[in-house]
Image (spheres, rainbow, N blue to C red):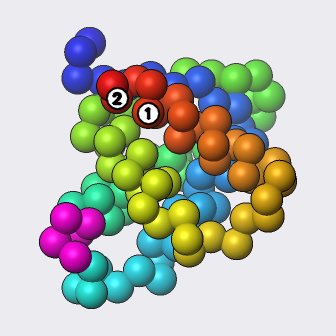
Amino acid sequence: MINTIKIKVDYNQLCVINSLMQELDNIKFEEQPQHLKSIVAICLELREKLLHKAINSRNNKKPFNFTMKYYFADALYRYLTEYSIYWQVASGSYEENAFLIIRNQLHQQLL
């Protein structure tokens, strides 16, 4: 389907993305610039889907495909790009590597 994006992740990478999205709890929506408000709103909805996926795939150790609508993928990519200054991720850590892999997959799919 042309309006969906598929990325390959494993359970641990999904957990990293979910932990990075915890920062959404601290972001004050009304203080965001207009062009970022839609990203925050969409990511709040996407976060629920990612949390459910993590719960359902917690026993799955193999990588799996995660399919999302284009606007979810675009918002997630923009969130991972625009809000990375908020995260306490050590350079060279597994978390940083997982974040970069997923961000790059999204970037390639969105082109």
Give the residue at x 23% y 85%: 30
Instruction: Inspect the magenta stretch and tell me whether residue 35 lies in it.
Output: yes
The kind of residue on which mark 1 rests is His
Spot occupied by residue 55 in the image (x, y as percentages of width and height): 63, 46
The answer to the question of whether label 1 and label 2 lie on touching residues, with beta carbons closer than 8 A, is: yes
Q: Is residue 57 above or below residue 20?
A: above
The one of 38 and 57 positioned closer to us in this rendering: 38
Q: Is residue 40 left or right of residue 56?
A: left
Give the residue at x 77% y 34%: 59
Q: Is residue 98 above or below residue 96?
A: above
Give the residue at x 40% y 24%: 109
Spot occupied by residue 46 in the image (x, y as percentages of width and height): 38, 50
The kind of residue on which mark 2 rests is Leu
Instruction: Inspect the magenta stretch and tell me whether residue 3 lies in it.
Output: no
Residue range corresponding to the magenta coloring: 33-37
Q: Which residue is mark 2?
A: 110
Q: Which residue is mark 1?
A: 107
Q: Secondary structure at mark 1?
A: helix
- Position of the N terminus, as image quadrant, is top left
Q: Secondary structure at mark 2?
A: helix
**Which numbered tag is attached to residue 54?**
none
* Spatial separation of the CA atoms under disc 1 and disc 2: 5 Å
